[in-house]
Amino acid sequence: MKIRKNDTVLVIAGKDKGKKGKVRFAYPKDERILVEGINFIKRHSKARKQARQAGIIDLEAPIHVSDVMLFCDKCNHPTSIGFRFLEDGKKVRICRSCKEVID
Ligand SMILES: [Zn+2]
């Protein structure tokens, strides 16, 4: 999967379109990511012994990777991801706009 944990992404579809956030978890099998502050859903929770909060709580829900673009810190722009091989054969991601290595 192109998007990974700790990437900064820009949401390009859905109700949080235009928002930016940091990827907290990646679920490569489902091609979904959990982004900080994005896609809050309301959940009703009953008061339980262990529960800190009762009533309605906000939870972040994972979104599909196709709903986001990687936000490049180097050129300060949302970008698509390319790949490049380093001299030692290692495959790295690059920003398609500024060609900088992302990782
Ligand atoms: Zn860039």
Image (cartoon, rainbow, N blue to C red):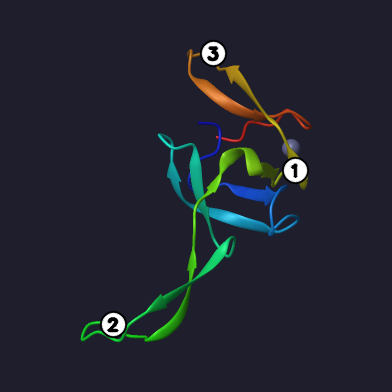
Front of the two marks 2 and 1: 2
Q: CA gap, disc 2 to disc 1?
A: 39 Å
**Which comes sooner in the sequence, label 3 or label 1?**
1
Q: Amino acid at mark 1?
A: Pro
Q: CA gap, disc 3 to disc 1?
A: 27 Å
Residue 51 tag number: 2
Q: Residue at x 45, y 44 (%)?
A: 26
Q: Is residue 57 left or right of residue 19?
A: left
Is mark 3 in CB contact (under 8 Å) with mark 1?
no
Label 2 crowd (10 A; few <14 / some 14-19 / many >=20): few
The residue that mark 3 highlights is 87
Q: Residue furthest left?
A: 49
Label 3 crowd (10 A; few <14 / some 14-19 / many >=20): few
Residue 70 horizontal/vertical position (percent): 66, 42
Q: Amino acid at mark 2?
A: Ala
Q: Is residue 41 left or right of residue 77?
A: left
Q: Residue at x 73, y 55 (%)?
A: 17
Front of the two marks 3 and 2: 2
- Pick the quarter of the image with the C terminus: top right
Is mark 2 in CB contact (under 8 Å) with mark 1?
no
The residue that mark 1 highlights is 78
Q: Is residue 65 left or right of residue 61?
A: right
Q: Is mark 1 within 8 Å of ligand 1?
A: no
Foreground of the two, 68 or 89 = 68
Residue 61 horizontal/vertical position (percent): 49, 58
- The secondary element bearing badge 2 is classed as loop
Q: Amino acid at mark 3?
A: Glu
Q: Residue at x 61, y 50 (%)?
A: 8
Q: Is residue 97 left or right of residue 101?
A: right
For ligand 1, which image quadrant applies?
top right
Q: CA gap, disc 3 to disc 2?
A: 53 Å
